[in-house]
Amino acid sequence: MIGIGYTLPAVVSVLLVIAWELLFLRTGLFRRPAYWMSMAIVLGFQIPVDGWLTKLSAPIVVYHDDHFSGIRFPWDIPVEDFLFGFSMVTAVLLLWERQRLRRETAESEAM
């Protein structure tokens, strides 16, 4: 089945991270312009690096055709790489934000 090896986990990772924020953590991260600017910065670095690693003319990283969607944009980058990138960066920022909120709550209760 095409895409099961890489596409399905990539999509599931995005859904899980979004659900984690919206249903459990509720940090409000997605409403902050700073978050979206951070994601733009990540993309600004991810595109040239990932493009260089996955370029079809001389790939360093090779994806088996049966394991991803086959959609590549831009510069031969599998779209699944952006999904995993979103999930990883967002999960780390959510953990960081959650820790900050806990620390602030503990400090305000100690006063």
Image: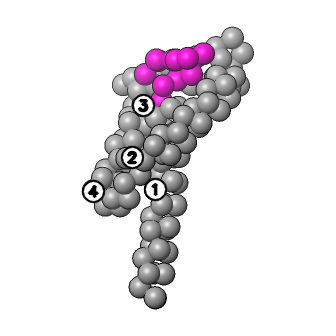
User: To which residue does mark 4 refer?
Assistant: 23
104 or 7: nearer the viewer: 104
**Marks 2 & 3, CB-CB < 8 Å contact:** no
* Nearest to N terminus: mark 4 or mark 3: 3
Q: Which residue is mark 3?
A: 7
Q: Secondary structure at mark 3?
A: helix
Q: Which of the numbered marks, if any, corresponds to residue 74?
A: none
Of 58 and 85, the residue lying toward us: 85
Query: Within the image, what quadrant is residue 59 found in?
Result: top right
Q: CA distance from mark 1 to mark 2?
A: 10 Å
Q: Residue at x 48, y 45 (%)?
A: 35
Tell me residue 73's x, y (percent).
52, 17
Task: Reply above or below: 29 against 83.
Answer: below
Where is residue 97 drawn, in percent x and y? 48, 60
| Residue 71 lies within the magenta run | yes
Residue 94, numbered circle:
1
Distance of label 4 from label 3 (alpha carbons): 24 Å
Check disc 2 and report its element: helix, strand or loop: helix
